[in-house]
Image (cartoon, helix red, strand yellow):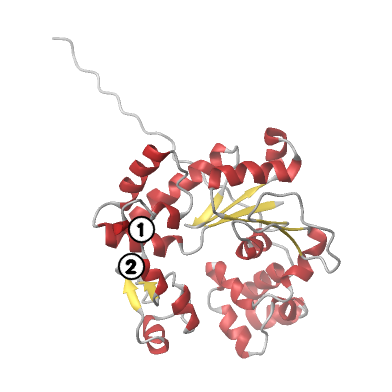
Amino acid sequence: MVICALIPRFELVAALGERRALSGLSERCSAEIDRSGAHPTDARAALRPKRPACAPPLLAEPVALAPEAGREQMVGEVSAPAEAFGVVRGMRVGEALTRCPELRLVSPDPEGVRKLWSAVLDRVESLGAAPESDHAGEAYFEAEGLHGLHGDGLAGVLAVARRALGSARLGVGPSRFAAYAAALQARPRHLARAPDPQPLGPRPAPAGAVVVEPADVSRFLAPLPVGLLRVRPELSSLPETLERLGLRTLGELAALPSRSVAERFGHPGLLALDLARGRDTPLEPRRPPEPVTERLDLPEA
């Protein structure tokens, strides 16, 4: 089973904090974490110091990350009010401003985000896990190899993950994509097992975890919107095409013949079809950077 640790809008919240703090967010948060002993896992919590100057109230307004210099003119992560206007990550700036004229664009801070998210991944690795993370705010790792380390099966792994990762949303599923979809439905104080038309009670997992069993993954994914496919960068433009063709849910996509999907959409379509059916590519854990040392020998006087 794959565990997804999700912190929504991580890059956007970190960028908002950087702008308001007027100083390095990563260094400041790290100093506060060192003093308090808190875990640097929830960007919103990290940006909520005792002094209100770092708080990001702009999240209550329609805001989005501006494109990085020299990159394609598309918006990055967006706030919930911006989403209400139909603005989504990967949308062209012109279209986003047309849909939401009041949209405010926030300059991204890739280096600050990288440092802050690296601290989160260090926490995941401290569990004995080997995380995969191609995007700040999302980390995936296999649960099976951790059972022996923490005991009590999946529940034990989730318990230590909750202690280490604070209020990050935790989702569990037989694939990366299913775990991500489960994490989207998780809440810090919500206990659930999804789905079960005849509920037998929640899985004994810590608050915040939503667990999707392999036998249930097709039913779980079926009613979800095809827009979830945007989590994979190579499929960012596919959901719009699917919606124009009348395919609104993952279940509708999963019901299509593989040959027809391949002929119409090629490899991206087949990947989307696999995801909708609960299949995914294997995880590719990150390789922590090896320390670099330098030695200088001076001649004796």
Residue denoted by label 1: 110
User: What residue sits 74% from the left and 77% below the top?
Assistant: 251
- The Cα atoms of the two marked residues, 1 and 2, are separated by 9 Å
**Where the C terminus falls, by quadrant?**
top left
Query: Badge 1 local density, few (<14 within 10 Å), some, or many (20+)?
Result: some
Residue type beneath disc 2: Glu
User: Any mark on residue 68, and which?
Assistant: 2
Q: How many marks?
A: 2
Q: Secondary structure at mark 1?
A: helix
Find numbered disc 2 in the image and state the secondary structure of the residue it sits on: loop
Asked if 21 appears above or below 229 in the picture, the reply is above
Compare residues 193 and 75 and report the one nearer the observer.
193
Does the residue at mark 1 contact the one at mark 2 (Cβ under 8 Å)?
yes
Residue 54's quadrant in the figure?
Answer: bottom left
Which of the two residues, 253 or 193, is positioned nearer the viewer here? 193
- The answer to whether 123 appears left or right of 25 in the picture is right
Residue projecting furthest to the left: 301
299, above or below 235, in the image: above
**Image-based side of 206 in relation to 133, left or right:** right
